Image (tube, rainbow, N blue to C red):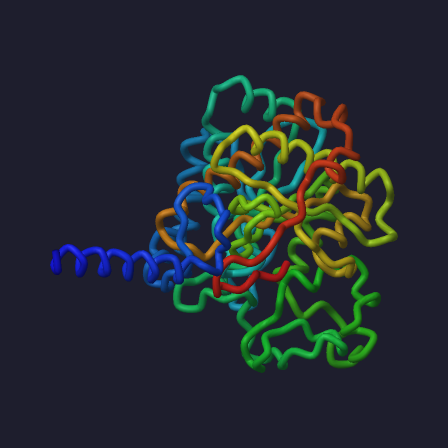
Amino acid sequence: MYKRVLCLLACALMFLLLVSGLAFAGPYVTPGGPFLTEPTTQDDFLDAFTDYEQLVNRIEQIEQTSNGRVKFEVIGQSNQGRDIFMGVVGEGDKNVLIHTQQHGNEPHGTEAALRLLQDLGSSGCPTFRQIREELTVHIVPRLNPDGSEPDVFHRFNVDPDAPARNTAEGFWTSWWEGVGWDINRYHWFDWEDSDLYANHPDDYPENPVPEAQALIDATKEVMPEWTIDFHNQGSYSSPDGKMVTSSIMWPNHPDVPEDAVNLSKQLCVAMMDQMNQYGYAEVTRYPGSAIPNIARNAYGLEGLGSVLVEIRGGIGHKSIGMLVQHSYEQMVVMLEKTADGSLYELDPDRIDEELPERGTTIGSYGPYIE
């Protein structure tokens, strides 16, 4: 009897420890796919992602196996001199653009983009054939090749001359000097409109963030109908208690043309409908700001459809495959709906009515910032 009581007490203690470890997740959180409550260390998962050398090799492989369908061009260099690649595939009159990993420590979109380029170049399935016939697809699989390297792996680019953060002066940088710039704060199509130029025109007569400028220049040349920006965020529980796998948002700057907003919302509806078919997926609304210098708003201000996608991140090996698949599905459905024309039949108002708010943070792993 005594041993049985001790056993029951031990089991109860183990249960309490487990519950206390998950208490911050709320009693009604339903995981979508593998559920880790704390981030793993970098060594636990960085080897599962593509570094720069592997990226170059993968690009060469995709070009070869696609028999010339996918062509890569260099649209610029990073601050440390690494090439920024853009893959181009398709023969359609309509241009579209997907870009990923502005922030070095947000890697899932890159893996999905490389897989998509492979499939667009090599697959003979009807969906991909129609995409190639109707669209010319441009994909930048990694915009931040310096910050994404395993020995760095941080949000910013790498610039030892970068000052410390002072957003009032236009310095969207690390909180410590000598680290780097936040690429997703420097999408100014006219640099003289920027806060940094207004406050420091002599020190910064041009955009000091070459990665952002490379994407701006490529966008000006391509002038796509829409552009999609893939990121990672932290872990969240939606209002109905489901684990959020991605959050999406359209341009919300007041000067974005209505047509661009509606097209962006139609893209969001397409993603929402696609992912709601799967039990592992929960799509919510990202609470994005209205500042003009982030990609989502900057490209919207140019009259383009523009969507931010924030995939759940920072949770280790077990969920990498699921989250890459989630990113891939969202990329494909936007291409598919654009190619067959069904995108333009979607009601953009549905996204305001049906997409839930992002919800609350789960655990101590803080949120990413767009």
Counting the numbered discs, the total is 0
Q: Is residue 188 above or below residue 310?
A: below
Q: Residue furthest top?
A: 126
Quadrant in which the N terminus is drawn: bottom left
In the image: residue 94, left or right of residue 21: right
Toward which corner of the image does residue 44 lie, by quadrant? bottom left
Instruction: Name the foreground residue: 90 vs 294.
Output: 294
Q: Percent position (x, y) of residue 142?
A: 53, 52
Quadrant in which the C terminus is drawn: bottom right
Whether residue 72 is visible, yes or no, is yes
Whether residue 52 is visible, yes or no, is no
Q: Percent position (x, y) of residue 202?
A: 78, 80
Instruction: Name the foreground residue: 28 vs 367.
Output: 28
Q: Percent position (x, y) of residue 110?
A: 49, 48
Question: Going 41% across and 32% down the picture, which residue do you hit?
Answer: 65
Instruction: Name the foreground residue: 62 vs 13.
Output: 13
Question: Going 37% across and 63% down the picture, which residue do you hit?
Answer: 42
Question: Going 52% across and 38% down the picture, which residue do you hit?
Answer: 281
Toward which corner of the image does residue 169 lie, by quadrant? bottom right
Q: Percent position (x, y) of residue 200?
A: 78, 80
Question: Going 48% across and 56% down the picture, which residue do you hit?
Answer: 25
In the image: residue 152, left or right of residue 84: left
